[in-house]
Image: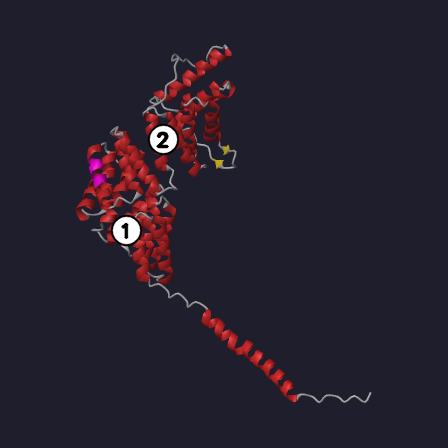
Amino acid sequence: MNRRRRPFNYFKIFALVAAIAATLYFSLYISPTIQQAMLPTPTPTRSPDSIIAEAEQALADGKLTQGIELYQQAVVLIPNEPKLYIEMAKGSMWLGDPAKAQTEAENALLLNPNNSTAHAVRGWALSSQGNYLDAESSLKRALEIDPNNALAHSYYAEMLTDIYLSGNGALDTIDLMREESRVALSLGPGMFETHRARGYVLEATANYEEALSEYESAAAINNKIPDIHVSLGRIYRILEVYDKAVNSFTIASQLNPNDPTPLLLISRVYYTIGEFGKAEQYALQAVTILPTDPNLRGNLGVIYYKNQKYESAVEELVLVVNGGQDDSGNLVNSLALTGDSIRIPEYYYTYGLALVRTGNCGEALPIFSRIIDTVSAADEISLYNANVGIQMCAEQLNITPTVSAEPTVEITPTP
């Protein structure tokens, strides 16, 4: 109880307070400064010119999607430049998206209503969607603004050719499209588009050797556009140079892997030369890319039938004739049987024949009757096969056919 207390050590207390104060000061003022200093410096914003240059190079290299994306970046920095929208529209057209191309061209026209090339590209996009009336109006406006616009003349020639091929052109359409393609070529002899347009006109008028020369000239100027290789492939196929046709379609597919058209055309080449296994392979790849397309389904169904895969043929062709969903839930719209179609009657009578082969004459006979009632008398192949199907069903059911059918062997058209 008499023990003495030790006196307070004021020096230690002072040191402790000072340490706490120093810690707080460091946390509040020094540490944030150090952390900021350690952060990476912001990346400097790229100049619009460098982005545009890269976009142009991407399109030149056939990297169409990348080129469009780069132009979109440039638009953010230069939103009031019509040329950027025009280039995006062109790229969208080469990728097979005319609706998007139309929007981009119209964006350019919002910025400059008197831009001749914007009107021309808009007309090109509208024509590709089958809207020939508005397309012609837009193309004529482009030529009013600039009569020497080679692009506008090229697109106008192509639109007139589409109208001619549809069978809806005026008596002078063929003369007009020839003249427009000549004018385009004279104004732009070194342009990809002018040679392509001239080739398209020559192809439509069955001047295949000359068309091939023009398409080759276009490809020599720019061989990174998928469409020109599709055009070359079509001509090679017509000229029965099948190896070159397959090669051209393959290049087109490599340049635009999301487009099933080149694969469809490859399948038709192999179908023509009787290599049905390869035809099936490419037809199936095309359907995988765009499973909702009834024409791709019809093509695959016809090839399945040729490979004697009758149940598979029925599964594909029922979607073409009646519409519906496949096993993966993809909705396919039916194709109406019309008298002026080429491939659709083939899908119908092949479906009917596949039904006969699988013992479903009750479903097949109405299909054959529809063909006979719908297609023109000039479509001998469709009528022939419909009658063959009716006779086959008559033999299966042991009844007298209601429609006269002398043929006893099925035939299929040469694609």
- Mark 2 residue crowding within 10 angstroms, few (<14) / some (14–19) / many (20+): many
Position of 331 with respect to 192 (left or right) is: right
Q: Residue at x 35, y 57 (%)?
A: 110
Percent x, y of residue 407: 38, 13
Q: Nearer the viewer, residue 167 or 406?
A: 406
Q: Earlier in the sequence, mark 1 or mark 2?
A: 1
211 in the magenta segment: yes
Q: Secondary structure at mark 1?
A: helix
Q: Which mark is residue 47?
A: none
| Part of the protein shown in magenta | 210-216
**Residue 242 appears in the picture as rendered:** yes
Q: Residue type at mark 2: give it.
A: Ser
Q: Give the residue at the far left of this rendering.
A: 186
Q: Residue at x 32, y 54 (%)?
A: 55
Percent x, y of residue 38: 46, 70
Q: Residue type at mark 1: give it.
A: Arg
Q: Quadrant of residue 347?
A: top left
Residue at the disc numbered 2: 267
Percent x, y of residue 222: 25, 46
Q: Secondary structure at mark 2?
A: helix
- Mark 1 residue crowding within 10 angstroms, few (<14) / some (14–19) / many (20+): many
Image height check: is 98 above or below 331? below
Q: Give the residue at the far front of this rendering.
A: 3
Percent x, y of residue 229: 28, 39
52 in the magenta segment: no
Quadrant the C terminus occupies: top left
Q: Residue at x 42, y 23 (%)?
A: 305
Q: Residue at x 43, y 26 (%)?
A: 304
Residue at the disc numbered 1: 141
Position of 17 with respect to 151 (left or right) is: right
- Look at the magenta stretch and give its main secondary structure: helix
